[in-house]
Amino acid sequence: MSTKKATRQAFGEALAKLGETRTDVVVLDADLSVSTKSELFAKKFPDRFFEMGIQEANMLGTAAGLALAGKVPFCCSFACFVTGRYDQIRVSVAYSGANVKIVGTHAGVAIGDDGYSQQGLEDVALMRAIPTMAVVQPADDLETAAAVEYLASHVGPAFLRLTRQNVERVHPEGYRFQFGKVDTLREGTDAVIFASGGPVAPALHAAEALAEDGFSVRVVNVHTIKPLDVEGVVAAAKASGGKVITVEDHTVIGGLGGAIAECLGEHFPSKLKRIGVQDVFGESGAPDAVVAKHGLDEAGITRQVREFLKGA
């Protein structure tokens, strides 16, 4: 795992490449194209890029209209800003059945210095609750590129959640993205970590550290949080003795941890530890320090999983 790239950067590159073959793809941004990296598409295809200004609600309504006219709009902003326009997403996009791809960058506390007002910490919970809305959060640059290509052909609204910070590559070249399926990155029998997005690489490192303590920990990347791969989640939990940990850079309420809890509660009740933002607001600080405070770095994940397994 040596290559590092922010998934927002991989998104911008993939979108610009996609525009070469998909002339129905259009892109909208709310004055953040330099940060969301939609500027890469804008430079190549200015006639298919729409700078909407700081008007996320209008942007979403326009995107819905373009979708209903046959276009495939990618609608971009920071995750907290774009999902903050919940009513427009719920009614104009989802209820109308508009084929809009909502892209939220700068997700989670890992953006650090920008502080709570910029940190998307409840966005997955909001989007999961909307009927027909798919929720995808890739773990590295390769998975992001594959997800963008997939979502361009996916019929229906979708939310793509991306990082500001660089993340380690966890997949080999040639990786094949399978929408709606979990992705096992490491086998193990004592417990399973379900992780998504930026924390996937630290979770893998934590599993390696725990192996030195004699613990065999499986790591499963959940890139598609909705629809959740119920069969894959249950199989991984059964293969790991019913000891389950979730790791996410998001509130533990309603996000990945909530989705896994709902799934296992119905299909295979398990002992569960949810690692993430524990029902508090985010705060400003150096990214590494804020991530560590919430226990989302390798050391924090290792410590919490070790304590969980010793107490199990």
Image (cartoon, grey):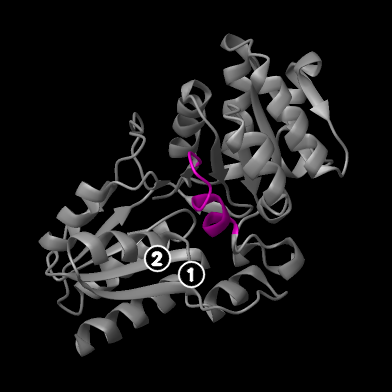
Q: Residue at x 14, y 65 (%)?
A: 240
Measured as percent of width and height from the top left, residue 294 is found at 53, 77
Q: Is residue 111 magenta?
A: no
Corner quadrant of residue 275:
bottom left
Corner quadrant of residue 211:
bottom left
SS at badge 1? loop
- Amino acid of disc 1: Ile
Report if residue 204 is visible in the image. no
> On the rendered structure, is 186 left or right of 25?
left
Measured as percent of width and height from the top left, residue 263 is found at 28, 59
Measured as percent of width and height from the top left, residue 271 is found at 22, 76
Report if residue 50 is visible in the image. yes
Q: Residue at x 39, y 50 (%)?
A: 1
> On the rendered structure, is 262 left or right of 123?
left
Other-residue count near label 2 (Cα within 10 Å), few / some / many at <14 / 14–19 / ≥20:
many
- Separation of disc 1 and disc 2 at Cα? 7 Å
In the image, 95 versus 286, the foreground residue is: 95
Q: Which residues are magenta?
A: 123-133
Give me the disc on residue 253. Answer: 1
Q: Residue at x 49, y 56 (%)?
A: 198
Outermost residue on the bottom side: it is: 311
Does residue 177 lie above or below 163 as drawn?
A: above
Residue marked by disc 2: 257
Other-residue count near label 1 (Cα within 10 Å), few / some / many at <14 / 14–19 / ≥20:
some
Does residue 52 lie above or below 221 as drawn?
A: above
In the image, 151 versus 306, the foreground residue is: 151
